[in-house]
Amino acid sequence: MKIAIYPGSFDPVTNGHLDILKTASGIFDKVIIAVAHNSEKLGFLPVETRVKLIKESVKDIDNIEVDSFEGLTINYAHKKGATVLIRGLRAVSDFEYEMQLSQANSALDSDVKTVFLTTKPKYNFISSSTIKEIFINKGDISKFVPEAVFEYLTKVYKK
Ligand code: ADP
């Protein structure tokens, strides 16, 4: 059974992330989308909320598990029996950072391979930080995020 981990901040999860996830779920037997706890980066949404919103967004896809983890992604991959890490590429600007990250992970364990996927062009410009910026400035984000994220943010920030 080929298990892949899709690690990231997902703060919040976007349609770009979901597109990558759906592609991965068609390639691998099981895909675990895992929210990384980052002690150095104070998030927009709490990790538990990010996990909950992803769960609501992928509830119809059988071979996807949603989780969170602390520490090295490689260690988490070992714990889960995964041999593949999924990362998304949007533009050349993502490439350098992603390349470094994959090489660092490969230096830690060369049996765990990073697979890069791209989204449909219509999702390509979407990032969590762009979504936050648009939302905070009262723009319409409904086309860029799953319904669960849109409803949650609209409800919470109305208060
Ligand atoms: P991180 O903080 O680990 O970069 P993100 O949640 O920002 O976490 O992104 C997780 C992964 O998804 C990264 O590999 C990122 O490049 C990729 N990604 C994010 N948005 C998109 C998108 N619109 N299209 C393709 N890949 C994306």
Image (tube, grey):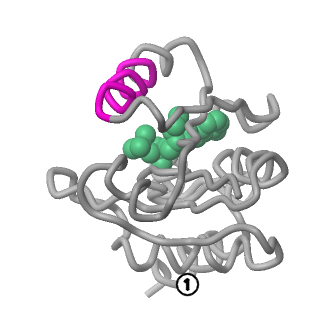
Region in magenta: 98-108
The residue sitting at 16% across, 58% down in the picture is 39
Q: Is the C-beta of the residue carrying label 1 under 8 Å from the nearest atom of ligand 1?
A: no
- Check disc 1 and give the amino acid type: Lys
Residue located beneath label 1 in the image: 155
Residue 80 to residue 38: above or below: below
8 inside magenta stretch:
no
Secondary structure mostly taken by the magenta-highlighted segment of the chain: helix
Name, please, the residue furthest toward the bottom.
159
Nearer to the camera, 85 or 44 = 85
In the image, residue 112 sits, relative to residue 19, either above or below, namely above
Residue 82: percent from the left, percent from the top? 53, 54
Whether residue 94 is visible to the viewer of this picture, yes or no, is yes
Q: Residue at x 71, y 44 (%)?
A: 20
Q: In which quarter of the image is residue 151?
A: bottom right
Left or right: where 100 falls relative to 40? right
Can I make out residue 126 in this image? no
